[in-house]
Amino acid sequence: MNKKGLDDAVDSMLEMFIFETNQNLEQLEQITIQSEKNGAFSGEEINDIFRIMHTIKGSSAMMEALEVTALAHAIEDIFFYVREKKPEKLDCSTLTDLVLNAADFIKTEIDKMEAGEKADAVAADLIEATRTFLLQLKQINGEQPDKITLPAKPKPIQEPIEEPPKKPTSYIELDEPVNVFQARITYKDNCEMENIRAYTLINNVKGIVGELHYLPDNILEDDESANIIRKDGFKVCFTTSKEYDEVSALLNRTIFLKELELEQLTDVTECSYWPKKEVLPKKVLPEKMIHKVEDREISHPSMISVNVTKLDILMDLVGELVISEAMVTENPDLQGLDLDNFYKAARQLKKISNELQDGVMSIRMVPLSGTFQKMNRIVRDMSKKLHKQAELVLVGEETEVDKNVIEHISDPLMHLIRNSLDHGIELPEERERLGKNPVGKITLEANNAGNEVIINIVDDGQGLNKEKILKKARENQLLYKNESDFTDKEIYSFIFAPGLSTNEKVTEFSGRGVGMDVVMKNINAVGGNIVVNSEPGKGSMITLKIPLTLAIITGMTIKVGHSRYTIPIMSIRESFKPSLDNILVDPNGNEMIMVRGKCYSIVRLHQIYKIAGAVTNFADGIMIMVETEKTTIGLFADQLIGQQQIVVKPIPAYIKNISKTQGITGCTLLGDGSISLILDAMGIVNRF
Amino acid sequence: MSVVAEEVMELDEDTQKDKYLTFFIGKEIYGIDIRLVTEIIGIQPITEIPEVPEYVKGIINLRGKIIPVMDVRLRFKKEFLAYNDRTCVIVIEAHEIALGLIVDGVAEVLRIGEENIVPPPEIRASQNKYIKAIGKAGNEVNLLLDCDKLLSDQDEAAIVDL
């Protein structure tokens, strides 16, 4: 094995470690916040946290992130104590803080490792705080620390590294009937460092076993053991109170597991390497079961994690496929020919490629729950600091959105939730005085509507203050028409303008007026829009409309001169042949059109883009009314070509650098292989 | 294994070193470092892009990849010549930007050793800003193009932005 191969192995291990630890941390955060809400840690939650900390401890030791290991170990100690002794007095809130701080620390370190840096921050303070907490916890509950940390049974094996003997061991006392299991684990070929993996495994099962022995027994001291494991598998024999299924599930979680043979023994004497006992020939119980990894994959929905760039490539290819399919089936050479069988086959091809496209799209779809769950933490931290009380209700978190879109909406959601909590929800006393429930309620709600996802952020706070917003807008010179002409919605949308904050004092969270404009920017970037509704005293509701995916949109292709342009169907309100009677021209030569009693500006595409040979006579062309955040305009083009699904491609960087043109956001390939430019109504409006 | 790969790479580099693809603009022959060239294609249907300098003719679809094309003739402020069968697009890649150069015609690949390359006269440096050097091969004299300048020109800032 050359060096490169080894590096690859380490890389993939690191990737796996980062992925798993991040997932564990997310779960940890959820559990802790949930239990803090409930005011107590349930047995299951304690076990979960214990398990997560244990896993992190083990794997971080393997990745040589020693501070993380130490911190995870300290937290684990607390939960070990809590689980074993079930102390009556437990300061849940402080404990949650401790756990969350630790999770934050670990997260930062993981991020560093991901960026290729060394995880080198020192967690001494956190560890100290954790230890102090444990000490206090023990004292409050009237126990001497050394009494409880001693295991009831003599230690079954020597702890090889990491834990000095005086530390509490994580082996548990068994009070239920003891089951004896023997397992043989083989790792996948080329997974490397089998001995270290075996040690991780031992670490993982430690929480549930009474006594444990394994072969080869020198996994840490002797690197040769890796070869033995590779050849013969790693054998473990232990006593536990858990049942077969639980043990099997735990062992099946082993990373790089190739095969697991797990059998239940009636007595430890059956194990050949159990010490201080007569060596007996190995006897296998009749209910002996051999589990293969294949079986496991059938029983559980198996997941694989795939690099997003691979998905992007696949996505691109499918896009190309759809286009080239159109190139074949709509080939001009076929025109006028009688090709029944050909079209039959072509329809079949179209059906399959559409299904393929849907399939690839669905791979990229991720439920919103991850993003939504993160908001719990924000609500918790903020309400604590602002001395407010609020609960977050999540609805429809299973709604799925393209991964790219999720990345863009996570920040906006965070800002909106912060805003609701900071500006919307009143202080508890204030709420009580108003006859409201002192605990504010913020609802985060998602649902599907056609090709869009609608996300509502509803709070039952004080609502938006119209006068204040207007005043601020006036100070910032944002009013673009008569103050009295503004509708409520238009006024509310000022909260997304940069630099506008109605909060009198700047807090840690909001009030500087940055943030909300980021919301607008991010949501616009994914082609979504925002509507604000509010009722003074009752609360406000912010609605985000976001397209399901960025990569494929439905567009209307139009023709101007020889050029073709595509307008996203979402922004088109209507299109019609303009009648000359409805067209007005002001003294400056600006053209306008009356549509059902309302007047809109006309933009001639051939004029702004200087396209030669286009239709200039209104009666011969077509008017397309496009809607933007600010206003609606009429785009004048030669003719409509048709509506189709298009794959959005970026404009080449060279063109972007050389031209400062506004209103063209990308390009796409049409069925005949030619290129169409994608128009952005917002950009066109901004030209004026 | 990796060592071998590196050697292969070096060899590859070596065979391309000092080699230039030559093309015509009118009567002049220009050379371009072959390492920058991805491929040579015939003239393709071009989609025009609004509001770009005249020499940027637009974008083309090269097997699903969208590439901007520049008319080198117009870039050198020469008269526009209608495209014909001999017109070629040389696709180059420099600074991770792919670009098609529309030229009157492609000549050949020449080896011009360093000893045969001389700097352009300095007196008119401002006028031959696209020319990096003059190369001699046999009796012919080639003007060697500086692709960076071709890409940037007055849009110096644009290239820095990258």
Image: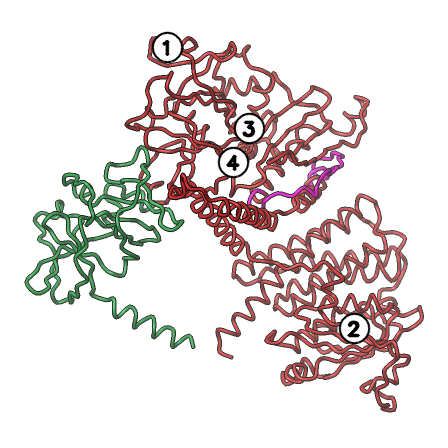
Chain colours: A red, B green
Between circles 1 and 3, the one closer to the viewer is 1
Q: Residues within 10 Å of mark 4 (few under 14, many from 20)?
A: some
> What's under tag 1, amino acid-wise?
Val
Q: Which quadrant would residue A266 be assigned to in this image?
A: bottom right
On whether disc 2 and disc 1 are found on a single subunit, the reply is: yes
Camera-nearest residue between A6 and A613 = A613
How far, Cα to Cα, is label 2 from label 1? 90 Å
Q: Residue at x 68, y 55 (%)?
A: A25
The x and y percentages for residue A134 are 80, 58
Mark 1 belongs to chain: A
Q: Residues within 10 Å of mark 3 (few under 14, many from 20)?
A: many
Which quadrant would the C terminus of chain A be assigned to in this image? top left
How far, Cα to Cα, is label 4 from label 3? 28 Å
Between circles 4 and 1, the one closer to the viewer is 4
- What residue is disc 1 on? A585
**Disc number for residue A166:** 2
Camera-nearest residue between B39 and A562 = A562
* Looking at the image, residue A150 lies above or below residue A433: below
Mark 3 belongs to chain: A
Magenta region: which residues? A381-405
